[in-house]
Image (spheres, rainbow, N blue to C red):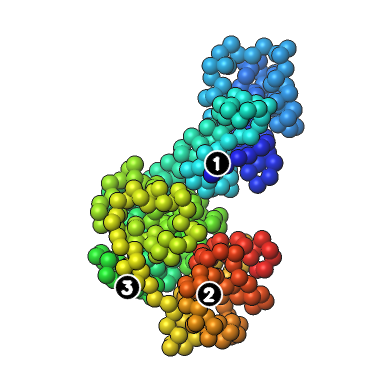
Amino acid sequence: MAIEFYKELGSLGYLANYSNHGFLKNGIFYKTAEHYYQSEKFDDKKIKEKIINASSPKEASNIGRNRNYQRRENFKDIKLEVMYQAVLEKFRQNKDIRARLIETRNEPIKEMTTKESFWGVGPNFDGQNNSGKILEVVREKIKEEVILNIIKKCKGKKIYVIGHENPDVDSIFSSLILTNILSSFGINAVFSVRDNNFIDKELINDYLKDNYEIISNYNHKSFILVDHNNLLKMDKYQVIGAFDHHKITNDIENLIEIEYASTGLLLYDLFKGYYKFNDYEQLLIALTVLSDTEYLTSSRFTKEDKKIFSTLGINLNFKKIQKKYFKSTDFTKEIEFNLNQDKKTYKRKDLVIERSLIKSYSQEKQKYYIKYKKAIKEYNIDLLIWCDYECKKTYLCTKKYDLIFPYFTTSTNLILDYLNERNYL
């Protein structure tokens, strides 16, 4: 699905040249990309300064379009490069929108300006859309620069590659894969975990061949975070970068965060042009996808994910793996134990949210749900996610609300977005 924006309006307005995101270039501060583009039309310093000092991008555009001013003779030949430089610096120097552009994944971008056929889609939607095309090129350049900056900062250091607490299949296998990738660049990378309270322990133990280091002391160490981007037990100076398929926290400077079916699949798509994944690594990537998409049944497994997943060329009997490894919550154990078994901490702005995930079938849900719902206050759980794998429904319980999610998912970040938009948090 294409990313379509119109001017600086709406949630995608940051893509437009008029958006209020300034940058420095050649020692000059430009208020917007439009200010830079229009000023580069001229050699006359007085006209350039007039545009640079314009109070709005609209005013800058009006001055730049004034045919009474003499333009540079070669501007038609260089205008695409000028616009590229403006857009590139805008996203390089504004961390918030840089992350949002990266998050648009590999989707085509279109400027839906029907009056403009060169920069936009034009009146018949068959325009050149050069603004959209430049944004796509900048997106790839920005991703590459973030990755190369992470690699550069890793050089000469011992780097602990580590996932979230209560590690699951994606956290463990993606940490191993990224460790191997970094090692191929000559980095002293260490495959690490926060604890060995593994979720899906049987599957991990059956497929994991490599040893890992359990990190109990976080002091005087450098980290790359995998499958999460919260600064839990660390400060920002210890974290060189992060790779995640969840929503952005803005805690970390060098962050690649894009919604993929799993972090493993994200790493595969990001690095397949730099690194040769062996058969074992591709198998682990496939298992991260299976685990994080409820064995390919979740809405998290998008059409784009399916395309990338198919290129792995892994011939797996998904039903057999699911039958062997998928385990619903063991309700013979104490409620406190089960609430803590798959418990994670999430940060949303000023909120710290303790989340527990329970997996059940319909009969178990009917028998135990009320007991667990009552218990969340006692055990300080802010959000209980209850997944019924028989009827494919996700139930949400906070200390105030009891809801059914619109579709079946285990994605806490999607659920937190949903609750936040409705002021349920």
Earlier sequence position, callout 1 versus callout 2: 1
CB atoms at circles 1 and 3 under 8 Å apart? no
Q: Quadrant of the C terminus?
A: bottom right
Pointer 3 local density, CA inside 10 Å: few below 14, some 14–19, many at least 20: few
Q: Does residue 319 appear in this view?
A: yes
Rendered image: mark on residue 198: none
Residue type at mark 1? Answer: Ala
- The residue pinned by badge 3 equals 324
Rendered image: mark on residue 386: 2
User: Could you tell me how many numbered marks the image carries?
Assistant: 3
Q: Position of residue 217 (x, y in %)?
A: 39, 70
Say which of marks 2 and 3 sits in front: 3
Q: Position of residue 214 (x, y in %)?
A: 34, 70
Per the model, the C-alpha gap separating discs 1 and 3 is 39 Å
Residue type at mark 3? Answer: Lys
Per the model, the C-alpha gap separating discs 1 and 2 is 33 Å
Q: Position of residue 236 (x, y in %)?
A: 50, 58
**Residue 71: quadrant of the picture:** top right
CB atoms at circles 2 and 3 under 8 Å apart? no
Earlier sequence position, callout 1 versus callout 3: 1
Q: Nearer the viewer, residue 306 or 401?
A: 306
Residue type at mark 2? Answer: Trp
Q: Does residue 26 appear in this view?
A: no
- Which residue does the image show at 25% across and 52% down from the upper left? 278
- Which residue does the image show at 61% across and 30% down from the upper left? 125
Rendered image: mark on residue 2: 1
Q: Position of residue 252 (x, y in %)?
A: 51, 55
Judge from the rendering whether residue 49 lies leftward or rightward of residue 249; answer left or right.
Answer: right
